[in-house]
Image: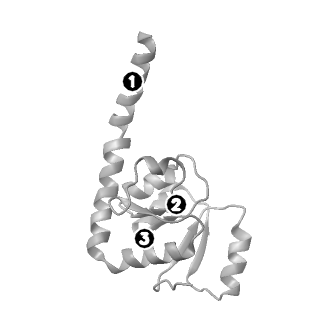
Amino acid sequence: MMKLKMCDLYIIGKGPLEAELRKKAENLNLRNVFFIGEYPNEIVREYMKISDVYLSPSISEGFSIAQLEAMISGLPMVCTPVGAIRSFLEHNRNGFIIDTKSSDSIVKTVNYIIQDKDILKKIRKNAYDTVVSLFSCDVVANKFLSLLENKMLK
């Protein structure tokens, strides 16, 4: 098993695996894993400001607003190729795609990101630019209006 460079892991939110994850962290004596729980968006944004990576190793996902929030915050997204993220995340350009259910893939990618500040800077900018160009209020409103106009013309 690969080793992750020293870093802190903040797990934000709640879910059915929380108790299992807490127990596993305790059994492994991991003092740098913090279970934050659920908080308002303003507090979550504060965690994003102090973070270097947003990790989303989901097995299944729909359209994740949290992933967009991470990207607009300039966080490099490290995620599995599930859900809508596949339509706008490009590996090694505005984020990173990792193998599903692969802790080695997570470790390898996170280590790569935190070791290379130039990559971190490039990905941060590209992640931000992606969200602005595809999901800003103006872009989404125009797409919605276009859909309505097309429906009305039929």
Identify which residue is drawn at 44% across, 12% down.
152
Which badge, 2 or 3, is on the more N-terminal residue?
A: 3
Q: Mark 2 and 1 residues: CB-CB less than 8 Å, in contact? A: no
Q: Counting residues from the N terminus, which is met first, the one under dot 1 or under dot 3?
A: 3
Q: How many residues crowd mark 2 within 10 Å: few (<14), some (14–19), many (20+)? A: many
* Horizontal relation, residue 123 to residue 77: left or right: left
Q: Secondary structure at mark 3?
A: loop
Q: Position of residue 64 (x, y in %)?
A: 52, 50
SS for callout 2 = loop
Query: Which residue is disc 3 drawn over?
Result: 51
User: Is 84 situated above or below 141?
Assistant: below
Give the foreground label among 2 and 1: 2
Would you say 123 lies left or right of 40 here?
A: left
Residue marked by disc 2: 80
Q: Are marks 2 and 3 in contact (CB under 8 Å)?
A: no
Q: Residue furthest bottom?
A: 29
Which quadrant would the N terminus be assigned to in this image? bottom right
Quarter of the image with the C terminus in it? top left
Give the residue drawn at x 61%, y 54%: 60
Q: Position of residue 70 (x, y in %)?
A: 43, 58
Seen at 66% across and 81% down, the residue is 25
* Above or below for 112 versus 39: below
Mark 2 or 3: in front is 2
Q: What is the C-alpha distance between the residues marked 1 and 3?
A: 36 Å
Image x and y of residue 111, in percent: 42, 79
Amino acid type at mark 3: Ser
Note whether 139 is above or below 110 in the view shown: above
Marker count (numbered): 3
**Residue occupied by mark 1:** 145
Looking at numbered disc 2 in the image, what kind of residue is underneath it? Answer: Thr
Residue density around tag 1, few if under 14, some if 14–19, many if 20 or more, within 10 Å: few
